Amino acid sequence: MNETILKVESLSRFFRVGGFRSRGQLHAIDEVSFEVASGEIVALVGESGSGKSTIARVLAGLYPPSSGSIFFEGRLVGRRSSRAVRGHMPMVFQDPFGSINPVLHVGHSLLRSLKLHRPDIDKSKRFDEAVALVEKVGLTPGADVLGRYPHELSGGQRQRLGFAQALSSRPSLILADEPVSMLDVSIRIGLLNVMKGLRDDEGVSLLYITHDLASARYVADRMIVLYAGRIVEEGSTEEVIGSPQHPYTRLLMSTAPDPRLPLADYEGSEDLGEPPKVIDPGPGCRFAPRCPLAMEQCRLNTPAMVELSPTNRAACFAVKR
Amino acid sequence: MSRPILQIRDLRVEYATSSGAARAVDGVTLDLAQGEFLAIVGESGCGKTTLLFAVAQLLTYPASTVGGSVLFDGVDLTALSPEELRVRRWRDISVVMQSAMNALNPTLTIGAQLADACRAHTEWDDKRIHERSVEVLSMVSIDAVHLKSFPFQLSGGMRQRAMIAMALLLEPKLVIMDEPTSALDVVAQRSLMRQVESLRRQLGFSVLFVTHDMSVVSHFSDRLAVMYAGQVVELGRTREVFDRPEHPYSKGLMEAFPSLLGAPRRLTGIAGTPPSLVNPPPGCLFAPRCAHATDECRSVLPELITNEERAVRCHLVNPVVRS
């Protein structure tokens, strides 16, 4: 087992919702704990509203946590952590069209990032380093790409640039928030390969946030399934995909569109449910209202994570130990 | 299969750009039978949405239809006046747009928007409008209380279903759908597709469905048309195209998405980017990205050749038929 670089302990983030006098609290993430080891890709999987983006944003320091702690490379990440910590945990955003300054050429932001985060590189070497970075993510010829403006790049190229920018501070972990969901299916795979390449060649860990189970399986070593702000299942990718234990993971598996599956597999139950907005929740499993296996105790008590194998855990009363 | 409700013949659409005319739809010919579900897939920029807009005659400047015809029930839509089109829209042809959030009016309730469409196209009284509104909402599993809801009070999946309810209001013969599922989560996506499918069986309308994610339609459409750079490159029964794609581009698309089944393996996708539509390359438009391209592919544009149930535009697939 590689050393742990990110450790999240019972992290919660609540948002006040409703009107001026409202005291309602939306529990976007609730007591979430997980770890990321160096050189691994961990997929955070869930539907919209499951809290997966909130986790990334809390980790990136965009929101302070409501409670819980984050340890990055053994050090507690505080409210006012330095540029050094942020630089080691950069984020790649979902929207490649909104996350790059359209009036500056591509090289500008990369060179600036190198200037801020890599004081070890001499000014005269910065351009060469930037060229090396964009070539690492498959944008060639690098020098030519750096001189272009964002509008001259396609969505897939922009998203590659997002990864180059994240790489510029020599990070140990990249937070990738749905980096491929706005791209065409035919381009996604190239970017997923870039992510694998970063892990294999650069030894970078990635937290890959997605709602697409199949792509998570393609790139990730481990998988964490979220539902309504809580982790419901966690384990090695092949274990979770091969034998999903939590009923929610099974629901996700059965709805993932896959033309290779025969049609018969689609004649399942009609589930029109959607994840609840968790405002001032009581105890009980949050999936219980949609769960085919729900029992009395699911509505009364919150299930704890149960160890199913050395690498697989699920939070469900109904799973076999 | 009964006679085609929609016949698209050699349709050409161009966008006026500063560097010349970009041909977004380049000689597309398709038939859609009554009650049939035809899916059109392709990358962004392949002209699939432009094609839908041309069929619905919704193109606005800089896009314009420069050739071909769209016969709906025997009437050429391209030759109709705006008023004649207005009468047919919603009643005969309805469109479900990609983003329900932008297509619904945020300041009006769902009920008011349904009533609006009824008043514009029918002489129904308020009671009849209400009854029909409740009826279409129940078809898409939305409770009648939501007639009084505003769009922001509904979830993404419900908004998209409300859009479909609106499209079905006047029992059109053809429903055109432009990526209605792309803003939805997988679970909502699947249930929406199932609902479209069962409504189609029940009501018998035809569906023309555009998506870039062919796995969405894999189990629902009767036929599948693969578009590349404004042209149809492959057309056939959905299952057969998935199981045995023949055009190199379709093959590449099938190889482009990871699966939950089978042993993990490395995928490559399709290298390169689609060609310029202003100055298209000579020959096959896919040749610059095609691993099997020959000199002939680079110089002669292949025809779309129909060979038993399947139509493919490729020199490598059709050498015998062509000679």
Image: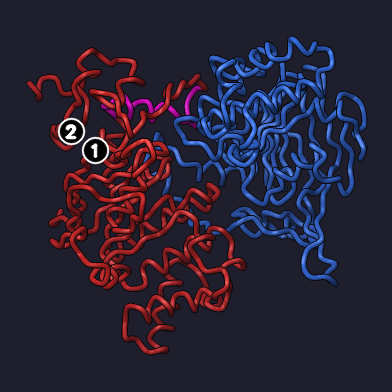
**Left or right: A286 with respect to A182?**
right
Asked if the residue under mark 2 is in contact with the one under mark 1, i.e. CB atoms within 8 Å, the reply is: yes
Quarter occupied by residue B20: top left
Q: Which residue is mark 1?
A: B235
Question: Which residue sits at x=50%, y=20%?
Answer: B265
Left or right placement of residue B142 versus residue B39 in this view: right
The residue where tag 2 is placed is: B304
Are labels 1 and 2 on one chain? yes
Q: Does residue A263 appear anywhere in the picture? A: no
Frontmost residue, B163 versus B54: B54
x and y, in percent, of residue A149 in the image: 57, 30
Q: Would you say the magenta stretch is mainly helix, strand or loop?
A: loop
Q: Is residue B199 magenta?
A: no
Q: A132 or B147: which is nearer to us?
A: A132
Chain A on-screen colour: blue
Task: Report the magenta residues as a range.
Answer: B244-263
Residue A159 in which image quadrant: top right
Q: Which chain corresponds to the colour red?
A: B
Please say if A3 is above or below B83: above
Whole-number angstrom distance, CA of label 1 to CA of label 2: 9 Å
Q: Is residue B314 visible?
A: yes
Q: At which x and y percent is residue B55?
A: 27, 54
Horizontally, residue B320 falls left or right of residue A200, namely: left
At x 21% / y 58%, what residue is drawn?
Answer: B78
The disc labelled 1 sits on which kind of residue?
Leu
Label 2 sits on a secondary structure element that is: loop
